[in-house]
Image (cartoon, helix red, strand yellow):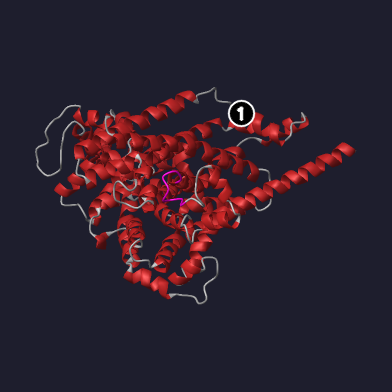
Amino acid sequence: MKRESTNRIIGTVINGIIYLLLGLWSVIVIFPMIWVLVSSFKTSKEIFFSPWLPPAELMWDNFSRAWSEASIGLYFFNTMVVLIPAIFLTLLFSAMAGYVLARFVFPGNRAVFFMFTGGMLFPVVLALVPLFFLLQSMTLLDTHIGLILVYVAYSLPFTIFFMTGFLKTLPSELIEAAVIDGANQYQLFFQIVIPLAKNGLVSMGIFNFLGQWNQYILPLVLMTSRKKYVLSQGLAFLQHQQRYQSDWSGLFAAVTMVMLPTMIVYTIFQNQIQRGLTIGALKG
Amino acid sequence: MNKRKYRVIIPFLAPAIILYLIFVIYPYGRSMYNSFTSWKGVSANQPFVGLRNYVRMINDEFFWNALWHNAQYLLFVPLITISLSLFLAFMINQRVRFAKFFRVVFFFPQVISLISIGVLWSYIYHPTIGIVTSIAKFLRLEWFFAIFGFQGIPVWMGDPRTVRGAIASVVIWQAAGFYMVLFLAAMEAIPQSLYEAAIIDGANRWHQFWSITLPLLWDTMQTALVYSGMGAFGMFAITKVMVVSGSATNRPADVLATYLYEQAFEASRFGYATAIGVTLFLLMLALSVLTMRMTRRETVEY
């Protein structure tokens, strides 16, 4: 009897410690984000002299200054101009290649598959120098089209690897039924295979979106004029600029504007997004 | 049929193969060759110099400096990240209330762009307005840092002794939630019956963790190790945004990737830079093969 009650006390204490530690880590994770959010409504003076107090007055002006003067709006636009076609083409080309590699027997099938997946072994920094000169000679340096093609090419290895595996698991019956109904291969692919592969495509879309959204080294090398910068580049540029002119409130507002959209989308679609992002490690 | 088959195969593979050959295979192949030339990028001719770039690299103290920093990251970051995330996953898996909340929150840093995180944290470390310094001052921790020879609270990003620790902490902060989700998914796949049997045998939570959970997570652990080990060889974006750019001043934060970038795009030593790149690639390859080998074990089936 006595032993049982001590056990229960130990259990409660352990549970208490667990909640304490989980709570502590939550604070460590959330606090920096709240701090930058609150600071982005302050004046630079307030940020410097009273970093811990809430703003005396909400400085919405910080956001408009960051958006137009610091060009965050333009960088957003550039990012979308690159990311939307890049992700669309990545998914399309990978689904097409994955479909052939998963469903057709032909000599060289394995070789092509390994050629693509082998690309995952190489660090992107190794390709930087030749890539820079290649794009220069193709007059694609400092163009959005150049960056789109490069993003697609570097997203292919993993996306093809994943889509091939995914398309192998599709039930053959539906595809065979469509063939009997007289569908040609193109109708088959776009009307049957693509809808069936929706889940895999969504996961890969999320995976590649965040990968390309985070990409810094490629645009840093390939996009040289400031009016074509993507967000990651623009933000890094602003950061370095602040060392000479301290418009901290503008910088904090810029960070908030870059941080919030993905966080909001994530809170709505957490499950899909967690799956989409960790899928690389789970399948790899 | 056979001919018709190729009317699908060829056009379906062509766009991916063409893009891949031009923008991925060619640059990698070219890099391997360029590392044996002394190319400065200006003229079209690329004098072949054999192994000279590699010899130069071996004698370059800044190369070793950068490599040493990568090695330090490699030693600490995967170990701490994985232990922390495993611990978090284990706690959440104890059927705690608000498990969903913790899971969502811990994953937050994963969906913020790395550059925003870098900017954000460089202000968290700021000597006057940053929270880290403020807390240390509030707790009067000067005596603690004095033990390690600091005068007052360290200037985290400005002090060669603390800058890499500060950067590594950000990386750990950012990645812990990612590995936690991986471990949680693996933990949820473990059949409950195994735990029930262990409870009947009188095993407490601690025993259950060591004798059931951990062995069954081995595959995931291997993946996590390779992943975060590769990460320790990267560190480009976070270093570049958190540390003042411009050579010489940032030597204490240099890693191979930033040193390569500097040699190529600031000093125009393209041949030499690619030699560093090839070395980086070979090191990463060796490391992942080694990790896979060393952690290979009989997989437990259940």
Residue at x-position 35% and y-position 30%: B283
Viewed as shown, does residue A29 lie left or right of B159?
A: right
Q: Is residue A171 magenta?
A: no
Task: Pinpoint residue A44: horizontal percent, then vertical percent.
Answer: 43, 70
- Position in image of residue B10 (x %, y %): 24, 38
Q: Which residues are magenta?
A: B155-162
- Please name whichever residue, B135 or B46, is drawn nearer the observer in this view of the structure: B135
Left or right side of A59 for B195: right
Q: Is residue A53 left or right of residue A151?
A: right
Depth check: give the residue in front, B288 or A282.
B288
Return the x and y of residue B5 as percentages of the image width and height.
28, 36
Residue at (18, 45) in percent of width and height: A133
- 10 Å crowding of disc 1: few (<14), some (14-19), many (20+): few
Horizontal arrangement in the rendering, residue A182 relative to residue A200 (left or right): left
Up/down of A140 relative to B209, above or below: below
Say if residue A244 shows up in the picture.
Answer: yes
**Residue flagged by tag 1: what amino acid is it?**
Tyr
Residue B15 seen in render: no
**Total tally of numbered discs in the picture:** 1
Which residue lies most toward the bottom here? A57
Q: Is residue B291 above or below residue A280?
A: above
Magenta stretch: includes residue B160: yes
Look at mark 1 in the image and give the residue it sits on.
Answer: B302
Viewer-proximal residue among B254 and B208: B254
Check the residue under mark 1 and report the chain it is in.
Answer: B
- Disc 1 element: loop
Q: Residue at x 61, y 28 (%)?
A: B302
Q: Hey, which residue is sitting farthest right in the picture? A: A1
Q: Position of residue A112 (x, y in %)?
A: 29, 33
Look at 43% across and 49% down and name the residue there.
Answer: A198
